[in-house]
Structure formats: structure tokens, C-alpha cells
Amino acid sequence: MQTPSVEQSATADRRTARGDRREPRAPYAALDSLARLIEYQLPTMRASILLLDAEHGTLHHGAAPTLPAEYFSAIDGAHIGPAAGSCGTAAWRGEQVIVADIATDPLWADYRALALPHGLRACWSTPIIDDGQQVLGTFAMYYDEPRVPTEHEQGLMRTAAMLGCNILVRARAEESLRQSEATMRAARAEAEHANKVKSDFLAMMSHELRTPLNAIGGYSTLMLEGIPNPPSDGQRNYLLRIQKAQKHLLSLIESVLTHAKLEAGKMTYRMENARLGELLDVVESLSRPQLAEKGIAYDCSGCDTKVVVRGDRQKVVQILLNLMSNAAKFTPPGGRVAVRTTIPAPGRVAIGLRDTGIGMTAEQVATVFEPFVQFDNQLTRPDRGTGLGMPISRELARGMGGDLTVESEPGVGTEFLLTLSTDVVAERAD
């Protein structure tokens, strides 16, 4: 009988030469341990586990701790069939095959010349079958004398086949998981590459578009200032329209670039303490012309302006300014925009901006933070944007450890709630 170490070396050589066509990454160590465990229960028995290559209809080495290497190498890759020894026939039939005497059984006609010189006389093989009734391989017991199995040996064969099935099914699941992870990694790499290409394209396009737009803005300003000659009233009107369109296009470009930067995870935040009242003063002064144009009243009496928020000052202003602009767009002339603050939890402040505009339906509320979503509305039709204002605002809020939510009722109005961290110590210091 050959020692296990020599047999294991021969097995490794056979796997390499064969290129491992069977169960992917078959768990040879676990199968070998199983075969040895059953052999330990039956000291005169030699165990064999073969794995089925269903595509080619062949059986290949799984484990054979004490079988002669020359014999096992000879049957490695043997085809299954109706008369292909004990294992090949068991895999073919999908049922147990008991051969009491290899020397006389017709199933071994083509293989007995391989087995008998090694003293192998009896072979009982049980197919390893999964829950889907798919044959995965075989578990076999060899003896050096003709005989049939006892009830105890039958029980061990069933147990070995069941445990072998568990090992192979788990190996198959792990391999499937590895392949899925590899596919996901490849898809992620492809997506990251596509995102980089997109970012590079946007950066290039922004430069190409900004340059002429800035030139248009600069020249229109010079012409409005009377350089080289004072414009007529009609020309002034045209120049003002040009400036408005130029600023609108620049704003659209900035929105697309900001969205791309957020998607790529490249947005940076300069976190610092800021008095809410100071931030609202900036927002109110920048929004005043838009509110005044439609006669919309601004009310911040419900706001605690002494609250100290923790965030990126510029980005907090950007969010509030976007909310204010959005409220002005969707509020009819003579409406009202109010700002209030609440403390939803210790160390947190919610800044609510409510308007008396047209409001939103439940369906619109569900999509308001999705990129490029625009609501068709007669109040905003002349001044449509990219549909990125709200998605950008929420991502900026979350990037600072906060959030942006919305509540709305059609015909009544909408309230956006910007939640940020507060610095209670800084508030008390003042």
C-alpha cells in the first residue's frame, strides 16, 4: 500500500496535467479528510471519491488516500456509461452499484485488468447527488476480497455520499460567489473608468464653454457701461437679455460639474462653526431681488439666528440659497417664504424653509431628489434649470453629516428641512 504523502504528490501532478476540468476549485483537502474518516471506521477498506465532469461525461480525481496511485491515475478521466465499472455505472444510472467480485462482474469487463493486479476485488459505489438530483460524483469502497456490504457499511456509504454532497455544494456556492465578486469588481472598475471619462469630458467641456461665456459676459458689461459707445435703449435691453442668458448657462454648467463631483466622491468640505443668522443674512441679500420681483414676503421671525451650525459655510449658503430660489420660483406673486428652526435632537438643528407655493403631489415628492427631474409648471417655464438643484443640495447636506427632507401639500405649499449639527459650546460662549 502506498503512503499518503506519495499518493498526494501524484494526485497533485495529475491535477496539474489535467488542468482541473471538474468542479471548479474542488475542496480536495475536505474530500481527502472525509475519505480518511470513513477508512478509519473500516480499516481494511480503501475509499475513493470521484468528481463528475458533466459536460464531458467523465470522472476525475477527488480523493483516494490509500488506493494505489498507478490504478487511480489509470481511471482518472474515465467515461461514465452503462457498463463502466462500479463508479462509472453508478454515475450513469444515478443509483448505487454493488460489485461483489470485480473478477467476474460484467460491469468491470473493460477495467478489471487495471484493478486485479493491485489486489482490488470488490467495489461498491454510491453516487453523490445534490438536492436538484444532479450527480456530482461518486463515493466508492474497495476491498481486497470478494464480498457484499454489511448494513453498517451501507450506512457509512450513505453518510459519506451525503457529506461529500455538502462539501461539493458548498464549494460550488463559494466558487459562484468568487465569480460574482470578480464580475462585480470588473463592473466597478468599468464604471469607475466610465465615470473618470465622464468627469474628464465635463471638465474639458466646462472649460471650453466657460471661456466664450465669460467673454460674452465681459463684453456685454463693457457695452452696457458705454464702451466704446453708449448703447441705445433697445441695445441695452438686448444686452441685458444676453447677460441674463449668459449667467443662466454658467449656472447650468456649475450644477452639472458639482453633480459630477459629488457622484465621483471628490467633493471636499471645510467644516467650521458659523452663526446661522450670518448665513441667512447672506442668503436673504442675494435672494431679495428675486423675491421682490414677485412681491414675495420673507419672514424669519421663527428662526433662532443665534444657533451655531457646524458645516462648510459656503455649502450651507449654497443649499439655503437654492431652497430660497426654488421657493421663489414655485410661489405665485404676493406669496410668502418663512424660515424657522427646531431642535429635533441634542446637538442637531433643523432649518425649515416653507413657502406658500403650488406645492407638490406625493409622486413629485418621491422624485424631487432624483437627478435631472423637472416639474412642468407655468410659473417656472421661462427659467428652467437642470433638475439638479435638489439632488445636489441633499448630497451636500449629507456630506456635512446632515440631511435634507421635504414635506408638501398641493395648493398649500412646501417645506424643506435642512438638518445640521450644532455647536452648543460655541453658542453658550456668546
Image (tube, helix red, strand yellow):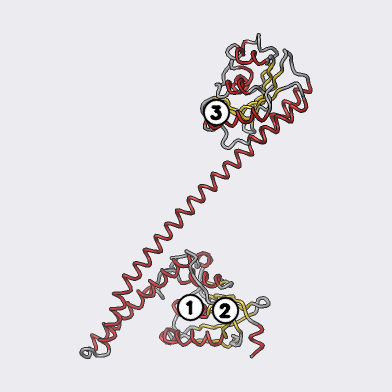
Q: How packed is label 3: few (under 14 Cα within 10 Å), some, or many (20 or more)?
A: some
**Picture quadrant of residue 42:** top right
How far separated are the C-alphas under marks 3 and 2? 65 Å
Residue at 29% in and 74% down: 212
Q: Check disc 1 and report the residue beneath it.
A: 318
Residue at 51% in and 26% down: 56
**Picture quadrant of residue 193:** bottom left
Q: Amino acid at mark 1?
A: Gln
How far separated are the C-alphas under marks 2 and 1? 15 Å
Element type at mark 3? loop
Is 344 above or below relative to 204? below
Element type at mark 1? helix
The C terminus - image quarter: bottom right
Marked residue nearer the N-terminal end (2 or 1): 1
Is 370 above or below relative to 15? below
Q: Check disc 3 and report the residue beneath it.
A: 54
Q: Position of residue 300 (x, y in %)?
A: 55, 86
Q: Is residue 2 left or right of residue 284?
A: right
Q: Check disc 2 and report the residue beneath it.
A: 352
Q: How packed is label 1: few (under 14 Cα within 10 Å), some, or many (20 or more)?
A: some
Front position in the image: 8 or 136:
8
Q: Position of residue 110 (x, y in %)?
A: 57, 13
How far separated are the C-alphas under marks 1 and 3? 63 Å
Q: Position of residue 317 (x, y in %)?
A: 50, 80
